[in-house]
Amino acid sequence: YLVESILLPSRQVADVFRGTIVFTKDGPVLSGLVVNETADKLELLQADAERKVVLKRDIDERKAMEVSPMPTGLGQSPEELRDILAYIRSDNPTPP
């Protein structure tokens, strides 16, 4: 499952990692992970790590993204995949 998730990140995307696209009434289109939602507003964590709060009354349409936010193309060679898996399984909290 882990290897598949690295090589084919969009094959199965858990709901907590599924991005959302928000079309606002005044034009801007936003996307990101929903990190907080109340009856009145929606907070998105965008790809650049910026958090954006949108009032629900300003949302025209909201759709779940079908593509994983995890980049494709990780572990292109067997060696790279081995290194990624070794890091994930290690107790080392910092990248090599």
Image: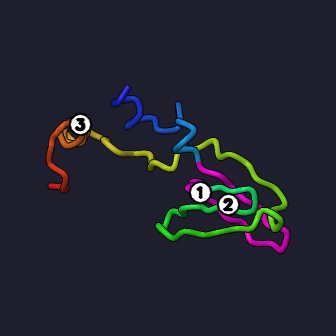
Q: Which mark is residue 9?
A: none
* Segment colored magenta: 19-36
Residue that label 2 marks: 42
Queried whether the magenta region covers residue 28, the answer comes back as yes
Residue that label 1 marks: 36
Cβ–Cβ under 8 Å for marks 2 and 3: no
Cβ–Cβ under 8 Å for marks 1 and 3: no
Work out whether mark 1 precedes mark 3 in sequence or the reverse, and give the earlier one: 1
Depth check, mark 2 against mark 3: the one in front is 2
State the CA–CA distance, disc 1 to disc 3.
31 Å
* Quadrant (top left/top right/bottom left/bottom right) for the C terminus: bottom left
Q: Residues within 10 Å of mark 3 (few under 14, many from 20)?
A: some
Q: Quadrant of residue 6?
A: top left
The amino acid type found where label 3 is placed reads Leu
Q: Residues within 10 Å of mark 1 (few under 14, many from 20)?
A: few
Mark 3 lies on a secondary structure that is helix
In the image, 30: left or right of 87?
right
Mark 2 lies on a secondary structure that is strand
State the CA–CA distance, disc 2 to disc 3.
34 Å
The residue positioned 60% from the left and 61% from the top of the image is 44
* Quadrant (top left/top right/bottom left/bottom right) for the N terminus: top left
The x, y position of residue 77, in whole percent, is 26, 39
The amino acid type found where label 2 is placed reads Leu
Q: Which mark is residue 85?
A: 3
Queried whether the magenta region covers residue 9, the answer comes back as no
Cβ–Cβ under 8 Å for marks 2 and 1: yes
Q: Residue furthest front?
A: 39
